[in-house]
Image: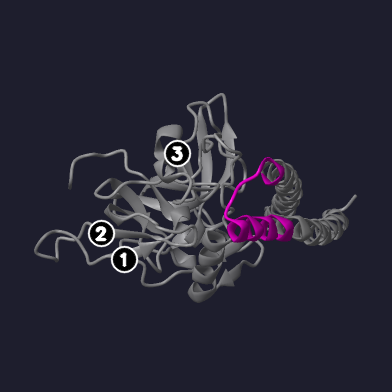
Amino acid sequence: MSADTKIAELLTELHQLIKHTQEERSRSEHNLLNIHKTHERMQTENKTSPYYRNKLRGLYTTAKADAEAECGILRRALDKIAEIKSLLEERRIGAYAPGSHLVCLATGVPSRRILSVAAAKMAGVYSDSDPPRKTMRRGVLMTLLQQSAMTLPLWIGKPGESPPPLCGATPASGDYVAKQGDKVAARVKAVDGDEQWILAEVVSYSHAANKYEVDDIDEEGKERHTLSRRRIIPLPQWKANPETDPEALFSKDQLVLALYPQTTCFYRALIHAPPHRPQDDYSVLFEDTSYADGYSPPLNVAQRYVVACKENKKK
């Protein structure tokens, strides 16, 4: 079965689940209305008789069962959405396999140098025999990164369930290996020899060498890096909900690496304020020696692009 056919089937199933959710909600409204009316009668009569207690007990038991049923349908719908996103990502990776490279030619990125075609030839990473490479305008790339942050799924656990690894600030497990296509923060050497953290995409992982191959998001298909695991930080795969799982978020004044707005570089920053609602971003203060206190004014960065900083000392 092709990816397109599978996606179409999943979309049909998702549509049915959404309809089923609405049916469940409509069915439970009658019971909720009965609860409301029963409370009104109790207030009017100003007493709580055994009759009303038993009636409310039954009504609330039914309401709880209805809510659990609706929750189950919504979880199945979220699973379908995750499957669709996974298939779309696999199709994207296949579309840009060797022979169909996508290169993001960025300009004006702080502390980043982009190789010209001539320089790439000299470096041995491009030749006239290579297939033509598509280009992506910087504005398009920034829009895609923003969309990726906005569509990062929100972790919704069951009562008492702890957020999993890679939810918000929760780190990956010690034996975690990022998959092909996953976005990571990667520490690489720039052309001038300085080291910097960049946004990259995993190409492969060698268990024998214990090393990743990653592509620079800004220079995909043009510059590839082979890096040890300690130079890779996986990005969050779920947003943490501040209202239910605040412990899965970075705290105020905590040192992090955050993606500087409109760039593909991670820089050291302090958390100025964590998100207050699920849709909110972090407010961070980037280290910047051009300011008297050594930090920039507060800037917003999405949960998707904020990770733990392994270096504790300020540079």
User: Is residue 289 inside the magenta stretch?
Assistant: no
Q: Tell which of 275 and 116 is nearer to you.
A: 275
Q: Tell me how far mark 3 sits from mark 1, CA to CA.
A: 22 Å
Most common secondary structure along the magenta stretch: helix
- Residue at the location (30% across, 58% down)? 284
Q: Which residue is mark 1?
A: 299
* Of the image marks 3 and 1, the number of the one nearer the N terminus: 3
* Of the image marks 2 and 3, the number of the one nearer the N terminus: 3
Above or below, comparing residue 225 to residue 24 in the picture = above
- The amino acid on which the numbered mark 3 sits, given as a three-letter code, is Thr
Q: What number is the disc on residue 285?
A: 2
User: Is residue 38 inside the magenta stretch?
Assistant: yes
Which stretch is magenta?
33-52
Q: Tell which of 170 and 122 is nearer to you.
A: 170
Q: Which residue is mark 3?
A: 170
Task: Tell me where residue 96 sits by quadrant.
Answer: bottom right
- The amino acid on which the numbered mark 1 sits, given as a three-letter code, is Leu
Q: Horizontal and vertical percent for residue 193? A: 29, 49
Q: Would residue 138 appear left or right of 49 to someone viewing this image?
A: left
- The amino acid on which the numbered mark 2 sits, given as a three-letter code, is Leu
Q: Tell which of 91 and 152 is nearer to you.
A: 152
- Residue at the location (52% across, 35% down)? 162
Q: For the residue labelled by badge 2, is the local secondary structure a helix, a strand or a loop?
A: strand
Question: Badge 1: how crowded within 10 Å, few (<14), some, or many (20+)?
Answer: some
Task: Tell me where residue 144 sits by quadrant.
Answer: bottom right
Above or below, comparing residue 6 to residue 145 in the picture = above
* Of the image marks 1 and 2, the number of the one nearer the N terminus: 2
Q: Would residue 137 appear left or right of 314 to someone viewing this image?
A: right
